Image (tube, helix red, strand yellow):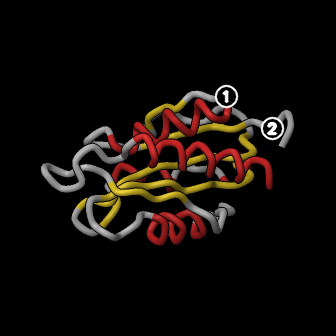
Amino acid sequence: MENSKIAVRYFTKSGNTQKLANTIAAALGSNAKPIPVTLVGYTDMLFLGASVYWGGIDPEVKEYIKKIDSSKVGKVVVFSTSALAQRAFGQMKKLLTQQGVTVAEDNFYCRGQFKALFAGRPNQGDLNNAAQFARKIVERG
């Protein structure tokens, strides 16, 4: 996707999803910004990251998704972290689809540290995998 506009937005409480967002943005020559920062103009591909807390994505993420203008975003790519097995992808895809937004079928997920669980995650291997995932998604368009 040469000359395409790519944006990275994320929501995090612990910093785990922010680590992924910063890595993805760096791999794509972009900047990661927290979700309160709105998109300006048309974005070909939006990488949107969130975490699962107590079985669901944060209400702030839900509100952000409700404000996405489907005419200004070509495609959303979801990435997420959680301490347990549940990914944010299903919940986010459902909300994004209800907004009329195209969602990539591929998504990135890795464990995130929560207290003593999964200490050090996302680790360097997770970050390398996130960067590789992002580059592949952009190459495919």
- Look at mark 1 in the image and give the residue it sits on: 29
* Residue 122 on image: x %, y %: 36, 46
Quadrant in the rendering for residue 51: bottom left
Toward the viewer: 140 or 69?
Answer: 140
Instruction: Name which residue lies at 35% across and 49% down.
Output: 60
Residue 41 vertical placement versus 121 (above, below): above
N-terminal of the two: label 1 or label 2?
Answer: 2
- Look at mark 2 in the image and give the residue it sits on: 4
Viewed as shown, does residue 95 lie left or right of 134? left
Instruction: Name which residue lies at 27% across and 43% down.
Output: 120
- Whether residue 24 is visible here, answered yes or no, is yes
Viewed as shown, does residue 32 lie left or right of 103? left
Residue 16 vertical placement versus 78 (above, below): above
* Residue 71 on image: x %, y %: 73, 52
* Secondary structure under the numbered disc 2 in the rendered image: loop
In the rendered image, which quarter contains the N terminus? top right
